[in-house]
Amino acid sequence: MAAEFDARFDAIKRHYLYRIVNRRAPLALDGTRAWAVKTPLDHAAMDEAAQYLIGKHDFTTFRSVHCQAKSALRTLEEVKVTRSGDGIEITVNARSFLHNQVRSIAGSLKMVGEGKWQPDHLAKILAAKDRPACGPVAPAHGLYFMQVDYPVNRLKIP
C-alpha cells in the first residue's frame, strides 16, 4: 500500500448484508448468525419500502443515540431485499454508514414485512428525522460486513 493509504478514510464503498431466517422452527446452526423471525414476512413489501431509502438523505431516524458522526447525511446506493426459502437477505451499499444504521433499517423493514407498516411509511419516518419514529434495532448477530471497495490508484505503491 502507499504510505498515505488509510483503510477507513480511503474506502469508496462498503457492502453490508443483514440475514433473517423467517420460519416458526427455532434456529439450530444459524442461532448466532441470523435474526430468527417467526412471523411470516412479505419480502416484496420490504423491498418496495427499502427503495425509499436509496439516495442522499438525512438518516437521523436510523442513527444510534451513540453515533459520533458530525452529520447524519448519507447516500445509500443500493438497498435490496431478497428471499430464498426461509432466508431473507437485506443488502445495503454506501460510502459510509451511521452507527446502527443498517440494523435500524433491518428492524424497520421487518415492521413492513409483518404488515404493521405500509412500504411508504419508511419515507415518512425518514422525513421525520426523529429516532423514536424508527422501528426496532435488529440484533447484531444478523449483520455481516461483506466487502469494502477502494479506488485503484490508492492501492498501488508509487
Image: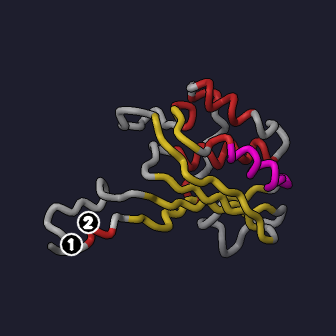
Residue 155 is inside the magenta segment = no
Q: Residues within 10 Å of mark 2 (few under 14, many from 20)?
A: some
- Residue receiving disc 1: 1
Tag nearer the camera, 1 or 2: 2
**Residue at (53%, 60%) from the top-left corner?**
16
Q: Which mark is residue 34?
A: none
Q: Secondary structure at mark 2?
A: helix
What percent of the width, then of the height, locates residue 11?
A: 35, 58
137 relative position to 113: left or right: left
Q: Which mark is residue 154?
A: 2
What percent of the width, then of the height, locates residue 61?
A: 57, 32
Who is closer to the viewer here, 124 or 141?
124
Q: Main secondary structure of the magenta part?
A: helix
Q: Residues within 10 Å of mark 1 (few under 14, many from 20)?
A: few
Residue 50 is inside the magenta segment = yes
Vertical side of 132 occupied by 117: above or below: below
Range drawn in magenta: 39-51
Vertical side of 39 occupied by 84: above or below: below
Marks 1,2: beta carbons within 8 A: yes
Who is closer to the viewer here, 137 or 46?
46
**Which image quadrant: the N terminus?**
bottom left
Badge 1 or badge 2: first in the primary sequence: 1
71 relative position to 130: left or right: left
Q: Quadrant of residue 80?
A: bottom right
**Residue at (58%, 62%) from the top-left corner?**
17
Q: Quadrant of residue 148?
A: bottom left
**Residue at (24%, 59%) from the top-left corner?**
6
